[in-house]
Image: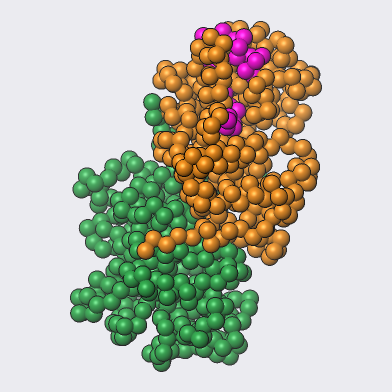
Chain colours: A orange, B green
């Protein structure tokens, strides 16, 4: 029985705990500094206060100050933190962790590497660690799936990316189950960009739906307008991913992730509210102060495209949906989408 | 005021009647032989018995035997027939219509051109007409949109494809409205293949959802499994469209059309029933004997891929989702999807 330590007891950390245990591993769940009360509850009840089921029998719980004890003897460590915990994870964990211990990150997001360059969080960490003289690879997991779906045993495809074939295979063997299907790739930059930027574009699709519902009523399905925006979203995503030199399989995962995010994830709820005319602050308040990582991603993506446009590497006109989404976020005012800019004439 | 004659009073013919009238055209609606009672109702009530609103004021109605009278003075003729009327349209209209009268087809589907070659219905008609010494181009309209959405003024993007720039622009000018957005392309084969084959793949996505609902209950959203199949669907669609040498804009329209079909069109209802374990016959009976053109497309696509595989042009292993869908249609027995065949290892 292998031991897998998961740092971060949010939705995705919890989902991976179920997956890892189902595959016969012993799971150690470590809270981040914001999870203290969750760890209290886990130690007391064996379950996360926000989840409808207990963690698998045998799961062990640790406060963040005891993370080194949890890591002892583990096959690898999963960093299941939100993008708001990226620097904490770097300073408090990665800088102190034995470089021989493999790390798999489940953080979704994009780091701003400066000068318009977008990187994954693993990229960002690896660079920062190198500056301290620490050399390590960091692996990452991403793909079209909600944590809730994983917990409900809905068939899910994810991808693990990173440098060494042997470690990729080890992590796949440790985590795959009959419903949790794992692809592997060395295209970390492409994959991580794909699963991050889909947030910007899923927001666009759901904003269009919110706007249409307000204009025409809830009872109609507004599939056509969603599909028109979805088409444009895929077009712009492919443009960004081509800039990142993504492998096409990574791009496809991003498109699948756009589908799941536009039809059923948290970003959709934000988009619906924005589309109905709420400001970003009002929408976030209505969503109970959810940590909306998608907003961070959108800003970074838009910033990167703007810088690249200034350098003549891209044409801003090729990203009308992204420009629209960022415009609504900036102005707080929803308006009709730039439909005519989504059409083409190949004649 | 231009006159536009639409032959076929089904959903798409009706939707285009609203669009054409909104743009200031006079519309003449011509029934096919199966529409006799619909024409009766239209002449009497000014509305289609199955629609919730009357046709625009001024719309004129014709029985099919009077189609030549309707066509007189028209700017162009729209063939809004189902794939079951393709040969009727060829024999009774196209062979007798003045070759100078432009024709726009809204028929969705794929013709079997023999030897594994798939073509659009316009291809099929143009070839058949040429054998009779008639030379004409035929234009086609396709894209991600349900007829209902168009009638409800939901923003819709469609594409008109064909040979001559001047005629493409004329049709766009005649049909575009503030909510009906028209792209143009000369890639007729790619576009028509894209909007046809999405049916096969949307069926796969909705079968997965039906199966998951039966296994896990309706109350969960099963987004992850849908997204995993959607990802594979996009991958296989791109493979087919690359074989057809489709322009990437046409491929994108196919992906958008997959989205709308998987989330809201008739093929979805069939897929849900098949996924729950109904046979094709049972599902069609439950759907009230709908004309399910998607089934024709799927058979033709599968047949084409099989022939191409026999010739060594493609590898059947690259189409696991298509093989799965056709297997369920053949056996009448739903089973677990081949999830492991949807994963990849780029290492």
Q: State which region is magenta.
A: A89-112
Q: Nearer the viewer, residue A210 or B173?
A: B173
Name the quadrant of the N terminus of chain A. Answer: top right
Residue in view at x 36 percent, y 70 percent: B165
Q: Where residue A114 appears, x then y in whole percent?
A: 56, 29
Asked whether residue B303 is in view, the answer is yes
Q: Is residue A96 above or below residue A234?
A: above
Say which of B328 and B157 sits in front: B157
Report the side of A77 relative to B86 (left or right): right
Regarding residue B273, the answer to whether it shows in the image is no
Q: Residue at x 30, y 59 (%)?
A: B118
* Residue A248: in magenta span: no
Q: How many marks?
A: 0
Q: Is residue A109 magenta?
A: yes
Quadrant for residue A54, please give it: top right
Q: Residue at x 75, y 49 (%)?
A: A279
Front residue of A195 and A115: A115
Q: Quadrant of the C terminus of chain A?
A: bottom left
Q: Is residue B128 left or right of residue A53?
A: left
Q: Position of residue A65 (x, y in %)?
A: 72, 11
The image shows residue A304, relative to residue A272, as above or below, that is above
In the rendered image of this protein, does residue A147 appear above or below residue A78?
A: below
User: Residue A195's spot in the image, x, y percent?
Assistant: 54, 36
List x then y, in percent, for residue A236.
50, 47
Instruction: Please name the residue shown 52% across and 48% down the image.
Output: A316
Compare residues B307 and A345 and report the one nearer the observer: A345
């Amino acid at each position: 029985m292998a031991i897998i330590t998961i740092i971060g007891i949010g939705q995705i950390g919890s989902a991976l705990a179920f997956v890892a245990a189902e595959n016969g591993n012993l799971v150690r769940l470590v809270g981040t500094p914001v999870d203290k009360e969750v760890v209290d509850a886990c130690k007391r009840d064996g379950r996360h206060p926000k989840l409808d089921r207990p963690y698998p029998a045998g799961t062990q719980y640790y406060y963040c100050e005891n993370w080194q004890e949890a890591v002892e003897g583990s096959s690898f460590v999963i960093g299941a933190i939100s993008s708001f915990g990226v620097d904490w994870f770097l300073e408090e964990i990665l800088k102190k962790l034995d470089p021989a211990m493999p790390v798999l990150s489940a953080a979704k997001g994009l780091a701003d590497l400066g000068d318009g360059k977008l990187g994954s969080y693993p990229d960002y960490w690896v660079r920062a660690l190198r500056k301290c003289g620490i050399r390590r690879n960091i692996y990452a997991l991403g793909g079209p799936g909600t944590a809730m779906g994983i917990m409900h045993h809905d068939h899910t495809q994810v991808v693990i990316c990173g440098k060494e074939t042997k470690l990729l295979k080890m992590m796949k063997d440790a985590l795959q189950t009959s419903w949790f299907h794992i692809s592997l790739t060395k295209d970390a930059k492409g994959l991580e960009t794909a699963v991050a930027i889909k947030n910007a574009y899923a927001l666009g699709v759901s904003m269009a739906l919110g706007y249409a519902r307000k204009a025409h009523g809830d009872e109609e399905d507004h599939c056509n307008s969603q599909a028109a925006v979805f088409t444009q979203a895929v077009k712009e995503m492919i443009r960004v991913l081509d800039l990142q030199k993504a492998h096409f399989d990574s791009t496809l995962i991003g498109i699948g992730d756009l589908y799941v995010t536009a039809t059923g994830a948290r970003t959709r709820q934000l988009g619906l509210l924005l589309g109905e005319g709420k400001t970003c602050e009002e929408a976030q308040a209505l969503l109970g102060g959810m940590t909306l990582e998608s907003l961070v991603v959108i800003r970074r993506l838009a910033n990167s495209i703007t810088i690249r446009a200034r350098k003549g590497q891209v044409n801003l006109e090729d990203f009308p949906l992204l420009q629209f989404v960022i415009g609504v976020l900036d102005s707080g005012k929803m308006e009709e989408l730039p439909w005519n800019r989504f059409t083409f004439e190949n004649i």
